[in-house]
Image (tube, rainbow, N blue to C red):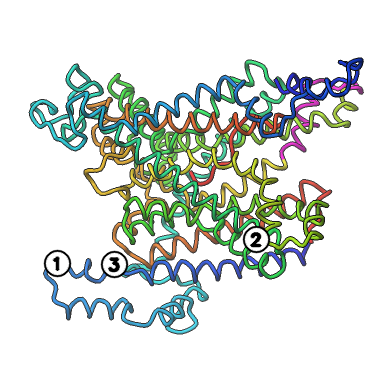
Amino acid sequence: MSEQEMARTDPAPGAGGDSAPADTAAGIEARSPWTLAARRLLHDKVAMVCLVVIGLIVLLAVFAPLVADLTGHPPNQQYRKTGLSPAGLPVAPSGEFWLGTDSLGRDILVRIAYGARISLLVGVIATAITVAIGVVVGLAAGFLGGWVDTVLARLIDIILSVPFLLVAIALVSIIGGGLFNTVLVIGAFSWASVARIVRGQVLSLREREFVEASRSLAAGNARIMFVDILPNVLAQVIVYTTLLIPVVIVVQATLSFLGLGLPPPTADWGGMLSESQKYYTTSWWFVLFPGLALLVTTLAFNLFGDGVRDAFDPRTDRMMAAKGGD
Amino acid sequence: MVRFLIRRTLLGVFVMWLITMAVFALFFVTPNNVARTMAGRQASPQVIEQIRERLGLDQPVWKQYLDFLGVTGDGGLLQGNLGFDYYYSRPVSEMITEALPITISLAVGAAVIWMLLGVSNGVLSAVFPRSFVDRALTGFALFFYSMPTFLLGLLLLYFLYFQLTLAGFRWFPPGGYVPLGDDPWGWFVHMILPWVTLALVLAATYTRLTRASMLDVLGEDYIRTARSKGIGERRVVLTHGLRSALTPVVTQFGIDLGQLVGGVVVTETVFSLPGLGKTAIDAIVRQDLPVILGIVVFASAAVVVANILVDVAYAVLDPRVRLH
């Protein structure tokens, strides 16, 4: 695919050589690296299927109240008569409860739809915070150099040496596991890897001629950093961002699974799986469906991120970013 | 080399010192009500105050920190003393020594599996790039990479413990730990599912690394030379290629092992293994700050040491790398 693209972008020397230069110019479409990347991505079937899946999950999250209306079951309503067996166990999928019920007789389908809201919200917001901090710190450290770099690089080292999951769990247990705190803790400890990547790139970019040119036109540090250098690291940042979202979703689900998620009646996937742990021997649907929702979401984001990486740099190997923790 | 080691060790000590400060600040400055929790609901303010005094929580934070370090007080981190657990007054260092073999059992066993799986899949993918085998192995890796550890653990428990036991095959226990010294077979059987869980999740990174690095190496001139000398393909790939392709893999391996010391929280929780991660989680639930702090400091030290070792290994494996 990439070779075809290159053939199309490179105007072959002989082609159209007889026509007037103006005609040739009109026939050649200027394509920025961004357009090229977008085209490659559009041709990537796996990535496009994943994008559709992500879109469907977003729709499920946005229209969660509609799912509740459709089934007639609000997310936190406990159906103790119809939703629990005489022995008090969850009931299997049926016409009434399409994906079965949980240990309190609540509709699993509706709770999965509401849970998607939490996963996506945390995934996107925490990733955005992480990337914003990481980019600014990386730019500052790499471009300004000197003592700023020494301090920031040391800070990056420290954050990367801290056992992230352990500290995140400890902090959430102390400050409480609300949505805001979860996002805060994830953001506070994940930016270092972004900063390290950006810093490495900026270190080589700042020696380039366009930076010198910009400086000779009296551009200040801030302008050079954000207007001249930032666009050059953006491709890498975008790739990293798409691959970070599923990691963050898993961290949030893990915190919930360990009992440090959102306060009880709120539906979220990690919390549902945590509850289902005690029932996996009797009620497979209680584990399977929330687990499947989580897996499909992370898999779709990972495959899509992989496609984005491929689109920006067709030479790279198709796989994902290194994963931290366990 | 010696100068490098001294410099890196000093830097590591400095980083560790900063980490202790940061972690201490995070945990001790944020409001905690451990004294209230320990005193119970009916306790009078006097009792709570007594407990705070006993735990040293009535001291200013800087004093508590210096005590923790061992600069003041009767022995601290500098003397190899990590303090005492709030509830039973057990030395934290003793709790760590007890839990560590379990975590190491888990990490090392899993490492063997993920290295075998990751590296062999990576080599296969690189030898047949863009083939069906490559795509299948990549898909396999990505599938498990996307799987949250606790979900994979639950699924393995469901199929390999519960369903197998129902079918009459009592091959795997539902969790727990048997010390290697007491019953080697029991230890092995109890560790299989945790090993597989951890290994499958981590193997993906190694498949990718090996594949990329192997593809680079196989394009080198000396590989062509080896082939043109008439050396068999198997030997070219495994002896000439793999040897130098493994350098980045070894680096990642060191970093991962270092992180696993404090990072196998989830696997240990799902399979009820009383290792460092589980001990930390239990301490977190009880708000037992000295234990949390001790384990975090210990785990960070493991990462710092692993990073130094990786740098040294890098230079040993690849003579082109010079240590400054």
Label 2 with label 1: CB-CB less than 8 Å: no
What residue sits 72% from the left and 30% below the top? A31
Which chain's residue wears label 2?
A
A162 and A215: which is toward the camera: A215
Element carrying mark 3: loop
Span shown in magenta: B228-246
At a point 44% along the width and 65% down the height, the residue shown is: B294
Question: Label 2: which residue?
Answer: A140
Residue B233 lies in the magenta stretch = yes
- Amino acid type assigned to the residue bearing label 2 in the image: Ala
Of circles 2 and 3, the one toward us is 2
- Disc 3, disc 1: CB below 8 Å? no
**B258 in magenta:** no
* Residue B123 rendering spot, x and y as whole percentages: 68, 27
- Give the residue at mark 3: B88
Q: Position of residue A181 (x, y in %)?
A: 37, 55
Chain letter of the residue carrying label 3? B
Crowd class of label 2 (few under 14; some 14 to 19; many from 20; radius 10 Å): many
In the rendered view, tell whether residue B251 sits above or below residue B66. above
